[in-house]
Image: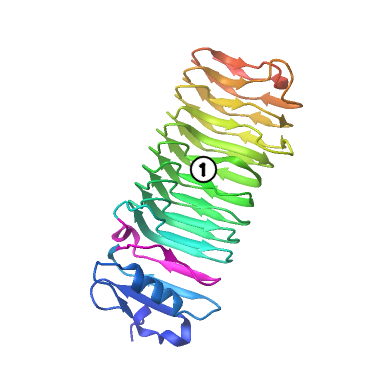
Amino acid sequence: MVMSLMSNPRGAVGTVVIATDGSGDYNTDGIADDVEINAALNSLPATGGCVYMKEGTYNTIAPIIVPYDNVAIMGCGRSTIITNGGVAFDLIEATNLTGLIFTDFYLYNGGRRALDLVNCDESFINRLWVTDSGNTGIEISGDDCIISNCIISNNVNGIAGGAAGERWIISNNQINNNSALAINLANFNFNRIMISNNQIYSNDNSGIGMSGNHYLVSNNIIRENARGIEAAHVSDPWNYNNIIVGNVIDSHTNSGIWLAAENYETIVSDNQIINNGWFGIQGTDPAGIYNNQRNKATGNIFRNNTSGNFQDMGVFDEIFDNLEL
């Protein structure tokens, strides 16, 4: 016997199927589909479960709201489309929950945020397409979250932190053509954040904006944004113990890397910083008023940065073993 999601008794496994073709446990008609989707979510056990959305377009007139911990919303890839036609509300919302999974569907043309997770810990966001939102594509706050293998384009910010959080992994995403920052973690202090192996290009503001401590920003390809990476302190304590290593930072209209206010013990190492329209690395603290201390730039390769490879201005204590071509 061939088993499928439809073969399982719904009450036994906490799995429900939503369809546009009449074959689901909950069936939509293309009008106010949030009603059936929210009903499916609320039918799950309070301990959580899975909502599987078959291929098709789901048109919503109100947010989809996740009600419980340990809920997974799964689709059929890019053929599962959730949209509200650009009306000014979030497509999917969750607040004060743990253990959520969002995977394999397309969030298109949401009027505000496509996915908004507020104080949600241990959330896993994987293999989503997120495009054409009226605000941020994916906005999260909480701890121990992962965003991976997504394509995020033509939003305002691609990914943003809605409030402080720590121990995030943002990896293997393609983030492009957003009208502000690709990854915006510059408005709050975030801790122990890993940003790695992303393709970030053609965003109107910076590729990565970061504020906080113990970042590892590594092995990203960051091209053709306004600025590659910016690190600026927004509230106490300082930015400290951040590492920017092994990235390709290429062809920005402004500087490749900008260290501004109150960076402490930041290491900028082994990056290729080339073809930028201003400086390769720009530090801004000419009078020593921003308390930049013990920052180090080493092992970087520079080439063809229009205004020069470094504008130090009191930010770096150590600059050595860089190759300037």
- Magenta residue check for 265: no
Residue lying furthest top in this view?
Answer: 307
Q: Where does the magenta region start and end?
A: 59-84
Q: Is disc 1 surrounded by few (<14), some (14 to 19) or many (20+) residues within 10 Å?
A: many
Q: Is residue 191 left or right of residue 176?
A: right
Rendering coords of residue 44 (x, y %): 47, 79
Residue pictured at 57% horizontal, 22% vertical? 301
Rendering coords of residue 94 (x, y %): 51, 63
Residue pictured at 52% horizontal, 65% vertical? 100
Residue where numbered disc 1 is placed: 197
Amino acid type, residue under disc 1 in the picture: Asn
Which image quadrant is residue 29 in? Answer: bottom left
Q: Is residue 169 left or right of residue 252?
A: right
Rendering coords of residue 257 (x, y %): 57, 26
Residue pictured at 60% horizontal, 51% vertical? 168
Between 295 and 41, the one nearer to me in the picture: 41
Q: Is residue 323 left or right of residue 26?
A: right
Task: Give the position of the N terminus as an image quadrant.
Answer: bottom left
Between 132 and 52, the one nearer to me in the picture: 132
Residue pictured at 30% horizontal, 78% vertical? 24
Tell me if residue 83 comes above or below residue 16 in the rendering.
above
Which image quadrant is residue 179 in? Answer: top left
Can you see residue 4? no
